[in-house]
Image: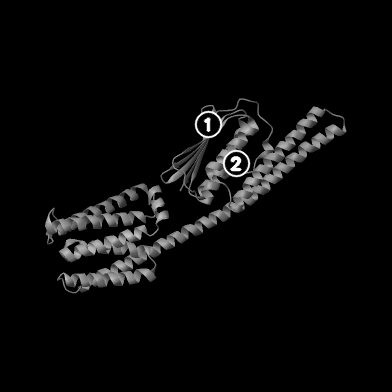
Amino acid sequence: MGVHGGHVRALLVAAVVVWAFGAYVRDAMQGSPRPGLTGAGLAVTALNAASFALLAAGIGAGGERPGRLRRRVRDAAPWAGDALLLAGMATSLALYGTTGADSGGFFLTMVALWVLVSRWPLRRAVPLGMATMATVSAVGMAAGDGHLDTGTYVGFIGVMLGATALRERRAAESGARRAEAAALLLDERTRLAREIHDILAHSLSAQLVHLEGARLLLSRDGDRTQALERVERAQNLARSGLEETRRALAALRGDAPPPDRALAGLADEYRAATGRDAAVEVVGDPRELSPPAALSVVRTAQEALTNVRKHAPGARVRLTLRYLPGHAELEVVDTGGTEPGLDIAATGSGYGLVGMRERAELIGGTLESGPEGKGYRVKLRLPV
């Protein structure tokens, strides 16, 4: 759904909530006894407040996208959300028994039942629905409302079926997301396997060229300084190829470090290889990224740093990883080269920024690149 569609949906939901709350307040004021600050009215006020608070807390504790506090509560007590909803159901039933069906207590009971059934498996949801129906009927009879009418039974069945359908839809969507993530991960591993091949092919072929040149120089009593330079170049190519292969293999096995730690390692390698500064900054609360997203962040940073070493020798680099609502961003900015270019074209992996952009688009992200002052900027944006 687009931005405008999302706004329309939000307005419709807000309108329904306002209408339901207004109807609830109207019915509560028409009940007997009415909410008040003394006597029976105070008890009605307390039951209303307790029901709303418990239901809101229970719904919030089991939200699909919990924040850091909710996540801590869920980890410490995974049953807390359901327990709060059951407590809210108990207070709403007490409210129904105190003021009758027209007071809103019955409505709050149905809200709690809907949320619980949408979360619980059928083996628990069906007994809960039957027990709730029996309890509501018993409370209604005790309060003088008599047996539940046909419309109320139909309402019970509608709540059960609707909540069950919602749960099944969520399960289907979750399964589809997992299947999509698995497919993306398999595609990424296939890409990494090709990349490892390219890394080894380029690195080894370049090493052979330099080593053969050194051999010829030494066999013909050539300049030993030039021969040593060629050997050192071959050594650097071997080291670089080995590091890139190790990173690709770690990603292929699925045991790569978190993106922020991987970026710090890349920055250390850049400083050691160039003698120039590479700063890493993490903005926002770090959270776990999906494997394809984490791989995309690391590989994009690696490719950007490789390009800096190739095309802007002597440049300083800043890597910024931002955790923002709904997405994460990686930005790599260099200050521009200050030294003559180096002949290290053979060290590339064969994909470059075009491959990074394709990798980002596969998982719903974008990659932008272009001049930034005297240097260059690469910005990756991924949904999380």
- Asked if one can make out residue 145 in the rendered structure from this viewpoint, the answer is yes
Q: Is residue 16 left or right of residue 36?
A: right
Amino acid type of the residue that numbered disc 2 sits on in the rendered structure:
Gly
Specify the quadrant of the image occupied by residue 174.
bottom left
**Disc 1, SS:** strand
Residue 46: x and y, percent? Answer: 20, 56
Q: Which mark is residue 292?
A: none
Instruction: Let me know if residue 151 appears in the view.
Output: no
The three-letter code of the residue at mark 1 reads Pro
Residue drawn 52% across the image and 46% down it = 360
Circle 2 SS class: helix
Which mark identifies residue 371? 1
Mark number, residue 352: 2
Crowd rating for badge 1 (residues with CA inside 10 Å; few <14, some 14–19, many 20+): few
What x and y, as percent, mark residue 64? 39, 55
Rendered location of residue 30, percent (x, y): 12, 59
Q: Mark 1 or mark 2, which has the lower sequence index?
A: 2
Please report the residue visible at 43 percent of the width from the left and 63 percent of the height from the top. Answer: 172
